[in-house]
C-alpha cells in the first residue's frame, strides 16, 4: 500500500511538472525517479487517480482540470525572477486564478498575493519557481 501511494505521489508531481503524453513516457519518468513499474501498473494508477488527457493529449490530474481551464483562458503571461513568479491575467481574473492556484496546494509554493489582474507567487527556491513556471506554462499549452 505504501509503495503504491508513494508511486502515485510521484506521478502527481511528474504530471504537474511535465508534459506527459503516453503511459510509456510516464513509466520512463517514474524509472528516472527510482520507481520500477510496468505499463499495466501505471495504467491502473491512471485509472485510480482519475488522470485525464487535455485536448492536446497531455495528462492532467482531475483536480487540476479547473485550474487548467482558468489558466488557459485567463492567464496572459508568466515570468520568473529568482524565487518569484509573476502571473498576468485578464482584467478582474487575478483573484480567481490566484485562488485556484492556492487550491492546487503546490509543494513548491510558500504563498501568493493576487490583485485585479496580477498574481505574485513566492516559491521556496529558484528551482521551485522554475517548476511553478513550467507547470503554469503547461496549463497554458506551452512548454
Image (cartoon, grey):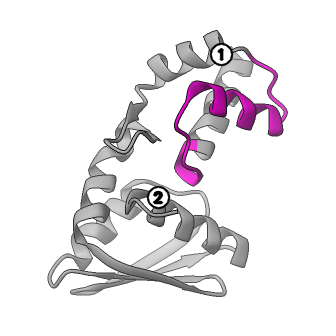
Whether 38 is drawn above or below 23: the answer is: above
Q: How far apart are marks 2 and 1 (CA)?
A: 24 Å
Residue under label 1: 39
- Mark 2, Cα crowd under 10 Å, few <14 / some 14-19 / many 20+, is many
- Label placed on residue 138: 2
Tag 1: Cα neighbours inside 10 Å, few (<14), some, or many (≥20)? some
Name the residue rendered at 25%, 78% in the picture: 94
Left or right position of 107 against 91: right
Q: Nearer the viewer, residue 22 or 113?
A: 22
Q: Residue at x 52, y 37 (%)?
A: 21
Residue 60 pos. (x, y %): 43, 41
Q: Where is residue 36 in the image (x, y as percent from the top left)?
A: 82, 22
Q: In which quarter of the image is residue 83?
A: bottom right
Question: Which label's residue is closer to the chain start, 2 or 1?
Answer: 1
Question: Residue farthest to the front?
Answer: 56
Q: What stretch is highlighted in magenta?
A: 15-37
Instruction: Decide whether residue 86 is among the magenta residues.
Output: no
Amino acid at each position: 500500500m505504501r509503495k503504491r501511494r508513494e508511486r502515485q505521489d510521484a506521478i502527481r508531481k511528474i504530471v504537474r511538472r511535465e508534459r506527459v503524453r503516453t503511459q510509456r513516457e510516464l513509466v520512463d519518468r517514474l524509472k528516472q525517479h527510482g520507481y520500477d513499474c510496468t505499463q499495466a501498473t501505471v495504467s491502473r494508477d491512471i485509472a485510480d487517480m482519475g488522470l485525464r488527457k487535455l485536448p492536446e493529449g497531455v495528462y492532467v490530474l482531475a483536480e487540476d482540470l479547473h485550474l487548467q481551464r482558468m489558466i488557459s483562458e485567463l492567464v496572459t503571461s508568466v515570468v520568473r525572477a529568482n524565487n518569484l513568479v509573476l502571473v498576468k491575467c485578464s482584467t478582474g481574473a487575478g483573484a480567481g486564478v490566484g485562488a485556484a492556484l492556492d487550491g492546487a496546494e503546490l509543494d513548491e509554493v510558500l504563498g501568493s498575493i493576487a490583485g485585479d489582474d496580477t498574481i505574485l507567487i513566492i516559491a521556496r527556491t529558484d528551482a521551485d519557481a522554475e517548476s511553478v513556471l513550467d507547470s503554469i506554462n503547461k496549463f497554458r499549452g506551452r512548454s
